[in-house]
Amino acid sequence: MKSKNCPEQLKDKIAVITGGSSGIGLATAKLFVGQGAHVYITGRRKAELDKAKAAIGNNVTAVQATSPTWTTSTAYSKSSAPRRR
């Protein structure tokens, strides 16, 4: 998908987009590829990454990335959240 506004503005550039399998991340990846960049998208779910890669087309690499020992719920659990005074 070529961008009409800034064709080839990002030619020969590389972008890494976390959460690139949906929402703003996916839209940004499409835009950057349309402007000539090669984009790496990351996400946790392989099926969603595969769909995003197909939707974006060329110049995209999907990378499944997870952290088995740390999650958002762990970081912000009730016991570890900052206490208000």
Image (cartoon, rainbow, N blue to C red):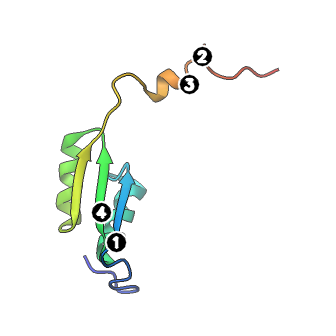
Q: Position of residue 52 (x, y in %)?
A: 24, 55
Task: Look at 34% across and 63% down and name the residue there.
Answer: 29
Mark closest to the chain's N terminus, 1 or 4:
1
Q: Which residue is mark 1?
A: 13
Q: Which quarter of the image is occupied by the N terminus?
A: bottom left
Look at the picture and state if 37 lies above or below 67: below
Task: Look at 36% across and 71% down and name the residue there.
Answer: 31
Could you say which disc has been placed on residue 39 in the image?
Answer: 4
Q: CA distance from mark 1 to mark 2?
A: 42 Å
Label 1 Cα crowd, 10 Å radius (few <14 / some 14-19 / many 20+): some
Q: Which residue is mark 3?
A: 76
**What's under tag 3, amino acid-wise?**
Tyr
Label 2 Cα crowd, 10 Å radius (few <14 / some 14-19 / many 20+): few
**What's under tag 2, amino acid-wise?**
Lys
Q: Which quarter of the image is occupied by the C terminus?
A: top right
Q: Where on the picture, by quarter, is residue 27?
A: bottom left
Q: CA distance from mark 4 to mark 3?
A: 31 Å
Q: Is residue 72 left or right of residue 41?
A: right
Label 3 Cα crowd, 10 Å radius (few <14 / some 14-19 / many 20+): few
Look at the picture and state if 81 lies above or below 1: above
Q: Position of residue 18 (x, y in %)?
A: 38, 50
Look at the picture and state if 11 lies above or below 71: below
Q: CA distance from mark 2 to mark 4?
A: 37 Å
Q: Which residue is mark 2?
A: 78
At numbered mark 4, what does the secondary structure look like: helix, strand or loop?
A: strand
Q: CA distance from mark 2 to mark 3?
A: 6 Å
Task: Look at 21% across and 67% down and name the residue there.
Answer: 59
